[in-house]
Amino acid sequence: MRSPIVLFYVADIWTSARFYTRLFGRAADQISPSFALFLLPSGMRLGLWSQARVEPVPVTRAGGGELGFQVACADEVDRLHVEWRSKGVTIALAPMVLDFGRSFVALDPDGHRLRVYALGDYE
């Protein structure tokens, strides 16, 4: 088996591909009218698939899970929050301390949750 891929079902490939291109600072590695693929430096692969073309038809919509991006420290969480806001990314949760560490949550154009977090001992 090859490395896993995370797939997000999206309403518009071009809108979502532009969003992630701006967010990641790099273009999709593969793009077609119904699919886009980003190969990230971490080795993770993020696929965007037109929800109108998914088989079998999905029974859930965005927001039922999250894609997490772990960073080294709480300061990096805050720095990325400022950077993503400056790019016009919708923020669902401002940086705050949670049970596992410091985190914020952003939303992509389809409402998929993108959590940036730094683990920490915050008891």
Image (cartoon, rainbow, N blue to C red):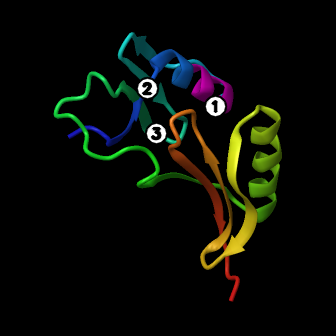
Which residue is more in the foreground, 117 or 2?
Answer: 117
At label 1, the amino acid type is: Phe
Q: Position of residue 59 (x, y in %)?
A: 25, 44
Which residue is more in the foreground, 81 or 57?
Answer: 57
Is the residue marked by circle 2 packed among few (<14), some (14-19), or many (20+) residues within 10 Å?
A: some
- Location of the N terminus (image quadrant): top left
| Marker disc for residue 11 | 2
What kind of element bears circle 2? loop
What kind of element bears circle 3? loop
Residue at which label 1 appears: 24
Q: Position of residue 55 (x, y in %)?
A: 18, 30
Of the two numbered discs 3 and 1 in the rendering, the one whose residue sits closer to the viewer: 1
What kind of element bears circle 1? helix
Of the two numbered discs 2 and 3 in the rendering, the one whose residue sits closer to the viewer: 2
Question: Residue drawn 25% across and 39% down?
Answer: 58
Which residue is more in the foreground, 40 or 66?
Answer: 66
| Marker disc for residue 43 | 3
